[in-house]
């Protein structure tokens, strides 16, 4: 009796090689949409004068990286606003798993 190769083809009749590119594109699209949501939320929840002087750099592994234009604004956001902004972002987008906001100059 010949031994059957078990995992050559998936139950749907498609090979992994055929499914993987579509899956990866879907993951990339979802990540891009999540970043767009984060950028939009960031710009709307922040004071407009602060928002104009910040830029969302990236969202990675639960960390939101924000580029700040000046040391004074960095200090204000880090010391006074960080907790409020983090809680508001977590409440607005709980599915994203936001852990922390990192401000960079």
Image: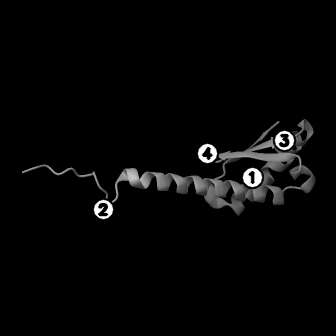
Alpha carbon distance from label 3 to label 4:
20 Å
Q: Horizontal and vertical percent for residue 88?
A: 76, 59
12 with respect to 79 (left or right): left
Residue depth check, mark 2 versus mark 4: number of the one nearer the observer: 2
Within the image, what quadrant is residue 15 found in?
bottom left
Looking at the rendered structure, the secondary structure element under dot 4 is loop
| Lower position in the chain sequence, tag 1 or tag 3 | 3
Query: Tag 2, which secondary structure?
Result: loop
- Which residue does the image show at 86% across and 52% down from the upper left? 51
Position of residue 46 measured from the top left corner of the image (x, y, whole percent) = 85, 55
The answer to which quarter of the image holds residue 71 is top right
Q: Are marks 1 and 4 in contact (CB under 8 Å)?
A: no
Q: Which residue is mark 3?
A: 68
Earlier-in-chain disc, 2 versus 4: 2
Q: Position of residue 49 (x, y in %)?
A: 93, 52
Q: Earlier in the sequence, mark 1 or mark 4?
A: 4
Which residue is nearer to you in this view: 99 or 31? 31
Mark 4: few/some/many CA within 10 Å (<14, 14-19, 20+): few
Picture residue at 34% right of the left edge, 58% below the top = 14
> Could you give the CA–CA distance between mark 1 and mark 4, rounded to whole angstroms?
15 Å
In the rendering, which numbered label is found on residue 61?
4
State the image coordinates of residue 7 (x, y, percent, origin top left). 27, 51
**Nearest to viewer (mark 1 / mark 4):** 4
Is residue 70 left or right of 84 when viewed as pictured?
Answer: right
Q: Which residue is mark 1?
A: 86
**Left or right position of 28 against 87:** left
Q: CA–CA distance between discs 2 and 3?
A: 51 Å
Question: Are the residues at dot 1 and dot 2 in contact (C-beta closer than 8 Å)?
Answer: no
* Residue at which label 2 appears: 11
Inter-mark Cα distance, 2 to 4? 32 Å
For the residue pair 84 and 39, the one nearer the viewer reads as 39
Does the CB distance between marks 2 and 3 fall below 8 Å? no
């Amino acid at each position: 009796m010949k031994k059957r190769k078990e995992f050559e083809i998936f139950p749907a009749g498609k090979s992994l090689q055929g499914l993987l590119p579509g899956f990866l594109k879907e993951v990339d699209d979802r990540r891009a949409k999540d970043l767009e949501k984060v950028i939009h939320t960031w710009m709307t929840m922040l004071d407009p004068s602060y928002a104009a002087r910040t830029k969302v750099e990236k969202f990675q592994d639960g960390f939101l990286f924000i580029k700040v234009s000046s040391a004074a604004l960095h200090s204000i956001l880090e010391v006074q606003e960080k907790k409020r902004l983090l809680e508001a972002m977590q409440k607005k987008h709980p599915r994203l798993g936001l852990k922390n906001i990192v401000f960079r100059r």
